[in-house]
Image: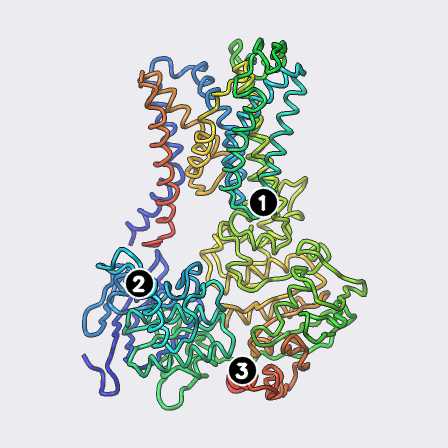
C-alpha cells in the first residue's frame, strides 16, 4: 500500500482501539507516518496520546485494528520486540534512557553488550572508539569518558536519542523531548531531528509547545477523546486550527484585568541570587499575581527556593509584612504562611502511595488532627471541597493519585496549598505537563482566590505568564531585565528582555529561538 | 469485557483477603487434624512463641515505613539480653535499673543508626549491618564471650553473686488469669499492647501519615515542611527501643544471659514484617499485617509441631511462607494496576 508518491509510508495504523476496563481510550485511530517526515501529535491530557505511543512501542496490546510497519503487519509482543523491529521511543523522563553511573562510551554502546555473540570481555579501547563513531555520526562532541550523571540535561537527552539511533530505527517516537531543555539546548535537538529527517526516518513528535511544532513539524495531528480530530499539513501549517481541533472549542485569550494590589506583603531589597549576580529588588502586594519569567538558568527557580527557605541568598534581604524574613527551611516558611508548589511534581510533590485526600491535606495534617490523631472525616471533607472548587476530574477523593492524568494531579498539588490561607504563595512551573484545559482551570482559580495573599508564579513560557499574572517581571542572568503590567503588553520588548537583548553572541542565539517561542501567544490569539 | 471485569474483581478480593483466608483455613485445618490444637492453652502458646519476634518485627516495620531498614534489631535484642543479665548478676542492680539501662541502650543505638543514615548519608542497610557486627562483638567483651549466670567466675577471680530479681523474671514468666488460671503470659500482653500502639501510631496519627509520606516520596514530604530527618531518626529509635524490649523479655524468660539465644530473631522478625505486606492487600509495611504475619508463622509452626513434623522443617516452612507472601504482594498487586509488564 503506497499512499502517494510524496514519501514512503513507514507506518500505517488502521482502526486501532484500546480500552482499559470501561474506559475506551482509543476509539479507532487511522494514521499514516511517512519516512522523512516529522508528524507532531497534539492532544490534551487524557486524549490518548500516550496510549497510542505505548501500543506502538509494545507496552500495550491493541484491542482491535491493525498496524502495518514497513509493509509488514506489526504487533510487537513487548518493548524489546518493537525496538528490534525498528520502532524506537525516547520517553519523557530522560533518565529512563541513560544509565547515569556509567560513562558516555558505555551508554552509547550498551546495546552491543547485550547482542547475541557479544564477546565476554569488554575491550575499553574498542568500546570508546565505537562510541566516538556513534557520537560523531550524531554530531555530538563530548568526552566519551565523562560520567553521564555529570552531564547537563541536554547532553543526557542527546545520549538517550543517540542510543535510540544506534539501533537504526525507521520510526522514532519522541515524547515531550524538550520539556526540560532550555531554548538553546532545544535548538541542538531540533538540528538533530533535521538530520534524521533528511536520513529518511519517520518521526512522531509529541509536544504541547507551539514553538517546538513551528520549528520541526511537517504536519500536525490533533487528538481528542481517543480519536484523531484533525490532520494539518501543507506549506503553511494551521496552528490555531490544530489547537482548536485538540480542544474542541475556539481557543479564547484569557482576559485579565490587572490589579495593582494593596499593601506590600513580600519585599526583596538588593537580593542577590548568586554570588556574582546583580541584586534584585521588588515588592509583591496583597491580591496581586506576579509572574517571574526567564530562560532556564535565569534564576527563577533560585528565587523561589530562597523565598521558601530551601536556599540561602548570596546577599540582600527579604521582608515579610515589613519584618525581616529569613526562613531556615521549608517548615519555617510554611509556619510563617509562605507556601510553595514546587516544579516537577512527580519527584517533588506527589506521594504516589496516597489517595487524593491524603495528598491534598499532607502539609496541614496538624490542622486535621486532635492530639496527633487524624480526623479522616475532616480530611475528606476539605479534600472534596477543594476537588469541586478547583475542578479535579476523579471518581472520589479515595482515588489513588497515580490514576489521575497530569493536569488533574497538578490540580491536587496546587489545591494542597490553597486549603489554608497563605501570605505568600509560590508556584514554580505550575503548568508543567498540564493540558490547556487544566491550565485554564488552575489559572482561573489562582486568580479568583488571590485576595489576602501575594502570589508569585515562576514560568519559563511567556504565554503562561500572560494568562495568569497582573504583573510580569523578566529575569535574565539572575537580574531583573524588565517589568510589565499585563495589559496591552509590548511583546517584542518582553521577548527581548527574556533573551537579554543583543549583548553577546551567546545571548543572540538563545534570543533567536526564545523569541520564536514567545511569539506564540500573540499569533495564536 | 464482563469476564475481565469479574476477573479483576476476584483478583482484587484474592489480594485483599487471600492471606486472612489462608490464616483462618490453616487454623481450621490444624484444629481438625492436630490433637489439642484448638484449645486456649495452645492459642496462648502460639502467641507466646511469636511475642518477642513480633515486637522486633513491629520495630522494623517502623523503619520500613520511612523507606529504611534495620538489620541491627537482632543484635540490639541480644545486647539487651546480655546487658540486663550483666547489670543484675555482675553489677547487682535492681530490675528497674536493668530495664532502664536496656531501654536507654536501645534508644541510643537507634539514635546512632539514624544519625549515621541521615547525617552521614550511609545507606541504611550498610549502617545497620555495621551496627549489627559492632553489637555482636560488644556484648561479648565484658564477659569474655561467656554467658552470664549467677555463680560465674569473673576475670578478677571473684564469683558473680548477683541474681535475676523476682520482679525482672515476672516480666517473662508471670501469667495473668483470664477465664483459666495462669493463662496469659506477660510477654503476650506486652506484645499485644505494643502492636496496638504501633497500629494506632502508624495508621491514625499525623506522625504516622507523614512517615508513610516520607517512605513514598521523601523529597515531596520535605517540601511540604516535614522534618524528614527527625522522623527517620525517630523510626530507628522506635526500632531500637522495641528490640531492646524484646531482649528484656527474652532474658526474663531464660533467667540467664545466654550468649547463644536470639540467633534467629533478626530473620524471623524481618520475615514477619515482610509477610505483613501481603495482609489485606496493603502492599506496604503496616502494624496489623506485621502482627498477623508473626501469628501466621506461629500457627504454622505450632500446628506442624503438633502433627509431629520434625524441627528442622521449621526454617523451610518459614521461607516458603515468606516467598508466597512476597509473590502475593508484588506480583498480584502489580497485575492489579492492569499493566502487562511493570
- Residue matched to label 1: A376
- Asked if residue B333 lies left or right of residue A431, the reply is left
Taking A430 as reference, is B321 above or below it? above
Circle 3 residues within 10 Å: few <14, some 14–19, many ≥20: many
In the displayed orientation, state which residue is furthest to the right. A322
The residue under the point 65% across, 69% down is A448
Q: Are marks 3 and 1 in contact (CB under 8 Å)?
A: no
Q: Which residue is mark 2?
A: A111
Secondary structure beneath label 3: helix
- Please identify, in this view, whether the residue under mark 2 or under mark 3 is nearer the observer: 2
Residue A330 placement, left or right of A108: right
Q: Earlier in the sequence, mark 3 or mark 1?
A: 1
Residue displayed at 67% across by 72% down = A289
* Residue B118 drawn at (x, y percent): 59, 46
Circle 1 crowding by C-alpha within 10 Å: few under 14, some 14–19, many from 20: some
Which residue has dot 3 on it? A510
Amino acid at each position: 500500500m503506497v499512499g502517494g508518491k510524496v514519501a514512503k509510508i513507514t507506518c500505517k495504523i488502521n482502526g486501532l482501539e484500546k480500552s482499559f476496563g470501561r474506559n475506551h481510550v482509543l476509539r479507532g485511530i487511522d494514521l499514516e507516518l511517512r519516512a522523512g517526515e516529522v508528524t507532531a501529535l497534539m492532544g490534551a491530557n487524557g486524549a490518548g496520546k500516550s496510549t497510542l505511543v505505548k501500543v506502538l512501542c509494545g507496552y500495550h496490546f491493541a484491542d482491535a485494528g491493525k498496524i502495518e510497519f514497513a509493509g509488514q503487519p506489526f504487533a510487537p509482543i513487548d518493548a524489546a520486540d518493537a525496538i528490534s523491529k525498528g520502532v524506537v521511543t525516547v520517553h519523557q523522563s530522560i533518565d529512563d534512557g541513560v544509565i547515569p553511573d556509567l560513562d558516555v562510551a558505555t551508554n552509547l554502546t550498551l546495546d552491543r553488550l547485550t547482542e547475541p555473540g557479544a564477546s565476554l570481555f569488554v575491550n575499553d579501547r574498542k568500546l570508546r572508539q565505537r562510541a566516538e563513531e556513534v557520537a560523531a555520526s550524531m554530531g555530538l562532541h563530548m568526552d566519551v569518558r565523562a560520567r553521564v550523571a555529570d552531564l547537563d540535561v541536554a547532553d543526557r537527552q542527546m545520549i538517550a536519542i543517540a542510543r535510540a539511533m544506534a539501533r537504526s530505527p525507521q520510526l522514532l517516537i519522541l515524547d515531550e523531548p524538550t520539556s526540560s531543555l532550555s531554548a538553546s539546548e532545544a535548538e541542538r535537538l531540533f538540528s538533530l531531528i533535521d538530520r534524521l529527517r533528511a536520513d529518511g526516518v519517520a518521526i512522531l513528535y509529541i509536544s504541547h509547545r507551539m514553538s517546538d511544532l513551528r520549528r520541526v513539524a511537517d504536519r500536525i495531528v490533533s487528538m481528542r477523546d481517543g480519536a484523531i480530530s484533525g490532520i494539518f499539513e501543507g506549506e503553511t501549517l494551521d496552528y490555531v486550527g490544530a489547537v482548536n481541533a485538540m480542544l474542541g472549542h475556539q481557543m479564547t485569550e484569557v482576559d485579565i484585568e490587572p490589579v495593582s494590589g494593596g499593601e506590600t506583603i513580600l519585599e526583596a531589597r538588593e537580593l542577590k541570587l548568586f554570588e556574582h549576580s546583580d541584586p534584585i529588588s521588588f515588592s509583591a502586594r496583597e491580591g496581586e499575581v506576579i509572574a517571574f519569567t526567564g530562560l532556564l538558568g535565569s534564576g527563577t527557580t533560585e528565587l523561589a527556593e530562597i523565598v521558601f527557605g530551601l536556599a540561602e541568598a548570596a546577599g540582600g534581604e527579604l521582608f515579610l509584612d515589613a519584618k525581616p524574613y529569613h526562613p531556615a527551611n521549608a517548615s519555617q516558611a510554611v509556619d510563617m504562611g509562605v507556601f510553595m508548589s514546587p516544579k516537577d511534581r512527580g519527584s517533588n510533590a506527589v506521594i504516589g502511595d496516597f489517595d487524593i485526600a491524603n495528598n491534598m491535606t499532607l502539609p496541614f495534617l496538624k490542622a486535621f488532627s486532635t492530639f496527633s490523631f487524624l480526623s479522616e472525616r475532616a480530611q475528606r471533607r476539605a479534600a472534596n471541597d477543594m476537588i469541586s472548587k478547583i475542578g479535579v476530574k476523579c471518581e472520589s477523593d479515595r482515588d489513588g493519585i497515580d490514576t489521575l492524568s497530569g493536569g488533574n494531579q497538578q490540580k491536587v498539588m496546587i489545591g494542597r496549598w490553597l486549603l489554608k490561607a497563605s501570605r505568600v504563595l509560590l508556584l514554580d512551573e505550575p503548568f508543567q505537563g498540564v493540558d490547556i484545559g487544566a491550565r485554564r482551570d488552575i489559572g482561573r482559580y489562582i486568580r479568583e482566590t488571590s485576595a489576602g495573599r501575594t502570589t508569585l508564579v515562576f514560568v519559563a513560557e511567556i504565554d503562561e505568564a500572560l494568562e495568569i499574572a497582573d504583573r510580569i517581571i523578566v529575569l535574565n542572568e539572575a537580574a531583573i531585565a524588565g517589568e510589565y503590567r499585563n495589559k496591552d503588553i509590548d511583546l517584542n520588548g518582553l521577548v527581548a528582555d527574556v533573551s537579554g537583548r543583543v549583548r553577546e553572541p551567546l545571548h543572540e542565539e538563545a534570543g533567536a529561538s526564545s523569541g520564536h517561542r514567545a511569539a506564540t501567544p500573540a499569533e495564536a490569539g | 469485557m464482563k469476564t475481565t471485569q469479574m476477573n479483576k474483581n476476584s483478583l482484587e478480593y484474592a489480594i485483599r483477603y487471600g492471606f486472612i483466608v489462608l490464616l483462618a483455613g490453616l487454623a481450621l485445618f490444624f484444629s481438625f487434624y492436630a490433637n489439642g490444637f484448638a484449645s486456649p492453652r495452645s492459642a496462648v502458646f502460639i502467641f507466646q512463641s511469636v511475642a518477642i519476634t513480633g515486637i522486633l518485627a513491629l520495630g522494623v516495620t517502623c523503619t520500613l515505613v520511612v523507606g529504611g531498614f534495620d538489620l541491627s534489631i537482632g543484635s540490639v535484642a541480644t545486647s539487651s539480653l546480655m546487658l540486663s543479665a550483666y547489670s543484675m548478676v555482675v553489677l547487682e542492680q535492681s530490675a528497674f535499673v536493668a530495664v532502664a539501662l536496656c531501654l536507654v541502650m536501645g534508644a541510643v543505638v537507634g539514635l546512632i543508626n539514624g544519625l549515621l543514615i541521615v547525617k552521614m548519608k550511609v545507606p541504611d542497610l550498610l549502617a545497620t549491618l555495621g551496627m549489627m557486627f559492632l553489637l555482636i562483638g560488644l556484648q561479648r567483651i565484658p564477659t569474655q564471650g561467656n554467658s552470664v549466670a549467677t555463680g560465674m567466675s569473673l576475670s578478677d577471680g571473684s564469683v558473680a553473686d548477683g541474681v535475676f530479681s523476682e520482679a525482672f523474671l515476672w516480666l517473662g514468666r508471670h501469667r495473668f488469669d483470664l477465664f483459666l488460671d495462669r493463662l496469659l503470659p506477660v510477654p503476650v500482653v506486652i506484645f499485644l499492647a505494643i502492636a496496638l500502639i504501633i497500629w494506632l501510631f502508624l495508621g491514625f496519627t499525623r506522625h504516622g501519615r507523614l512517615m508513610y509520606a516520607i517512605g513514598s516520596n521523601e523529597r515531596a514530604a520535605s517540601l511540604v515542611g516535614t522534618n524528614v530527618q527527625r522522623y527517620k531518626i525517630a523510626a530507628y529509635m522506635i526500632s531500637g527501643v522495641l528490640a531492646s524490649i524484646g531482649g528484656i523479655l527474652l532474658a526474663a524468660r531464660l533467667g540467664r544471659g545466654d550468649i547463644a539465644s536470639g540467633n534467629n530473631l533478626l530473620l524471623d522478625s524481618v520475615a514477619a514484617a515482610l509477610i505483613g505486606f501481603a495482609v489485606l492487600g496493603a502492599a506496604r509495611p503496616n502494624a496489623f499485617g506485621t502482627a498477623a504475619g508473626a501469628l501466621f508463622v506461629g500457627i504454622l509452626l505450632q500446628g506442624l509441631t503438633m502433627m509431629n513434623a520434625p524441627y528442622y522443617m521449621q526454617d523451610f516452612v518459614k521461607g516458603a511462607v515468606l516467598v508466597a507472601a512476597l509473590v502475593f504482594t508484588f506480583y498480584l498487586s502489580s497485575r492489579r494496576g492492569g499493566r502487562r509488564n511493570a
